[in-house]
Image: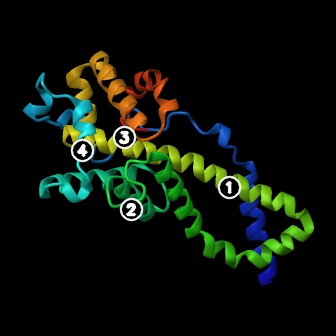
Amino acid sequence: MTVIIFTISSLSTLTSFAESDIEEQPVLEGVLVGETVEGINSNDVKLSREVLSEEFDLEEEVRNMPSIDEMTKDERKLFDKIVEEQTELSNVTEKEIFKKELTNFFDKESDTYNDLSAAQEELVEEINDSTLLENENLAFAKEVFASSFGVKEVEAAKKKKSSGIKVGVSVRFAGAVFNAVIGFAVGGGVGVIQSFIIKKGKAEAKRIFTKTVSSRLKAWGAKKLAVSIGVAVAIALNYLDIGT
């Protein structure tokens, strides 16, 4: 009976892996501005005079964002609040891992500090490792399954699962990073970012964000993405979760 239960469980899981198609992942994941998100209302947000002033330079503020060990008490409180919000918006199951890696990205003592690709890879690796125990518990059933359907089919399904995790989580993580740096600069989470867009107007916001995001992508080792970022920013202005 135990073998049958494990085998059925494995079959169901592997079938779901095979049916999922990473090519169907939306290019832009996020929350439309018109949609309601609990606790987020950009209409109620008031920006500081500094952020609203003509002298405010978002690109410079983002570039000069301090490492978490250099933040003031108030800055760290704001940062932690943004990280918590982004972790919730990420919709990932492994929230503690996501939050830890997002925090590490802004910690100069971390191996993944300001390295987007390295941070994404480490996040995916940590998530894969977190499922290792579950996989080990199903190991015997998978052996039985493999003997019936073939090792190649099982390995292909496992590989597809890993790819799916990598694509989805990597996109969400990159989005959270951008929301964090922009939010930190303007003084809050996604509601504050939307308020900033409303105050600046879409045309000006597009110019500011394109310049800022492009420079950060180059600094974080993703120069190829920086080339076409203007189009993505234009679309993202219609989303509450602009980072993603």
Alpha carbon separation for disc pair 3 and 1: 26 Å
Between the C-alphas of marks 2 and 4, the distance is: 18 Å
Residue 221 pos. (x, y %): 46, 40
Q: Which of the pair 76/214 is nearer the observer?
A: 214
Q: Residue beneath label 3, please?
A: 178
Where's the N terminus, which quadrant?
bottom right
* Inter-mark Cα distance, 1 to 4: 36 Å
Callout in the foreground (2, 1) = 2
Horizontal relation, residue 107 to residue 196: left or right: right
As helix, strand or loop, the secondary structure at mark 2 comes to: helix
Position in image of residue 150 (x %, y %):
90, 63
Q: Which residue is mark 2?
A: 100
Q: Is residue 157 left or right of residue 196?
A: right
Residue drawn at 36 percent across, 58 percent down: 104
Left or right: residue 153 versus residue 212 is right
Q: Amino acid at mark 3?
A: Phe
The residue closer to the viewer here, 77 or 111, is 111
- The three-letter code of the residue at mark 1 reads Lys
Residue 161 is marked as 1
